[in-house]
Image: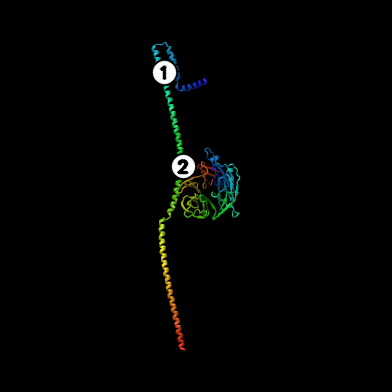
Amino acid sequence: MGAVTDDEVIRKRLLIDGDGAGDDRKINVLLKSFTKWCNSPGTPEEGFMQYQRMLGTLAQCEFSMGKTLMVYDMNLREMENYEKIYSNIEQNIMSAHEKIAECKKEIQRAKRIRKNRQEYDALAKVIQQHPDRHETLKQLEALDKELQQLSHIKENVDAKLELRKKQFHVLLSTIQELQQTLESEYFLLSVAVEQTNL
Amino acid sequence: MGPVELLHMSVFSQSFSPCGRFLAAGNNYGEIAVFSLSAALSPDATAANQKPVLTFTAHEGPVFSLLSTDVHLLSAGNGEISAWSWNELTKKNVKPLWTKRPNYKSSLEIPEINSMIINPRDNSLVVGGGDNNIHIMDLEHGVFKNILQGHSDYIHCVSVRDREAEILSGGEDGAVRMWGDDLVLVLFQSCARPQFGKWISCLTTDSDWMLCGGGPSLSLWHLRSLSPTSIFPLSGCQRQAAFYQDKILAVGEGAFVSHCLLGGEVKAQIPCTPQSLNTLQLNTNSTEHRVLTVGGSSDHIDVFTNLSYRAFSLSF
């Protein structure tokens, strides 16, 4: 267990140290200079300067630590942001799929409607070629009336013909009777004349 | 099959399997080739997938008509009809289930069968061919039960009106006959093109509307009133047409598929490989392989996944 965590620690340190270019080294150097400064016999100015230098190094370390913390925060927030965008995009994809399905159904419906419209148009064209129904009815009525009138006239003419036929018949038969009567009288007369001659 | 034979090959008929995954095509040498659509349409298809999975000689003469029922593939050859089981064909077993021959009057000449269709009302097979008659065969019992006579020349195409269960037939004599309760005859005046003749080679119906063409121009007729509503200005003679959604697809002379609107205008002409096309089929049996295939005077069958352009070609 200890070896594992040691490995982890070593790996992490090696990884991190790549970009710090010696943040760890700085802390080690600081520690060394601190111990040197505590044990240094030098003049107070030198000691003061070393002290200032150490404060400077400390400040640098604190600064880089603060920077790293901020970067860590920023990374966390970026991750959240990306998660949000990711789920957003997923939702959009789903709704786009649904919309596509809807549109496909719409297209089918529209095609059917268009087909029906074209069928209506085609039939309408054929119907337009035929004459209007009102006009045809009116023509039919007019023809009917004419037909009635003509048949009326025909009846009249027929009746007249019948009448004339009958009248002529009567005339002719009367004439014939008269002729017969006259002939028979003439015959009787001639017979009487012959008898008196004898 | 040598290169010369491939050059002279014509595809006359096509039919999709009931599951929609296979296409059977018949050519003028009497062979039927079965192509696997699912393999050819898959994203990792190779050139080998565009070859047939099975080719066999079905008849002596050209296979002019192919028809699929729920389990069978019916093929018409020189005067005889053979039935094959789709299941057996997918397992590469090429033994026909049965072969029947309609009763022809003279036994000397054997008329070819040009067109077959199923009448779903009484599950019968309607066959029209070179002897000027329509033979009706009951599919359950396998006997020819009726002969409709009336055409004075051979029959090119038959079709069935689903709702009224009437049979429509068009022939070389230029007449379209509707065989129902009372026989009706249709003749063509306005769309006649005397320079091509009066034969009717393509007939398809939508129960209320009928498309017919051939020698006369392709025209759309309203069947209730028997009046022509639109005439399509297509230059060649059309050999097959189909209603699809709101459009009409027609193939014939000319290396293209014509898309027309019901009103009579030609919307598009999509170019194809064969020089002239004989057959057009839409795969309505399957939702994921919804393609249009056309075949004609070439050994290539063009496949359209999107109606506006040719995707690829299957070849014999």
Chain on which label 1 sits: A
Residue B166 relative to residue A144: left or right: right
Above or below: residue A74 compared with residue A126: above
Q: Measured from the top left, where is residue A170 in percent x and y?
A: 43, 74
Q: In the current view of this chain or complex, which residue is farthest to the top?
A: A41
Q: Are marks 1 and 2 on the same chain?
A: yes
Q: Measured from the top left, where is residue B5 in percent x and y?
A: 57, 46
- Quadrant position of the N terminus of chain B in the picture: top right
Mark 1 residue type: Leu
Chain on which label 2 sits: A
Q: Which mark is residue A45?
A: none
**Number of marks drawn:** 2
Between circles 1 and 2, the one closer to the viewer is: 2
- Quadrant position of the C terminus of chain B in the picture: top right
What secondary structure is found at the residue carrying circle 1? helix
- Residue at 43% x, 72% y is A166
Mark 2 residue type: Lys
Of labels 1 and 2, earlier in sequence is: 1
Q: In the current view of this chain or complex, which residue is farthest to the left?
A: A45
Which quadrant would residue A169 be assigned to in this image? Answer: bottom left
Residue toward you, B37 or A105: A105
Residue toward you, B129 or B316: B129
Whether residue B9 appears in this view of the structure is no
Residue toward you, B258 or B66: B66
Q: Mark 1 — residue?
A: A58
Q: Mark 2 — residue?
A: A105
Residue B314 relative to residue A68: left or right: right
Q: Measured from the top left, where is residue B15 in percent x and y?
A: 54, 45
Above or below: residue B308 compared with residue A183: above
Question: What whole-number distance in Å separates the C-alpha atoms at marks 1 and 2?
Answer: 71 Å
Q: Residues within 10 Å of mark 1 (few under 14, many from 20)?
A: some
Q: In the current view of this chain or complex, which residue is farthest to the bottom?
A: A198
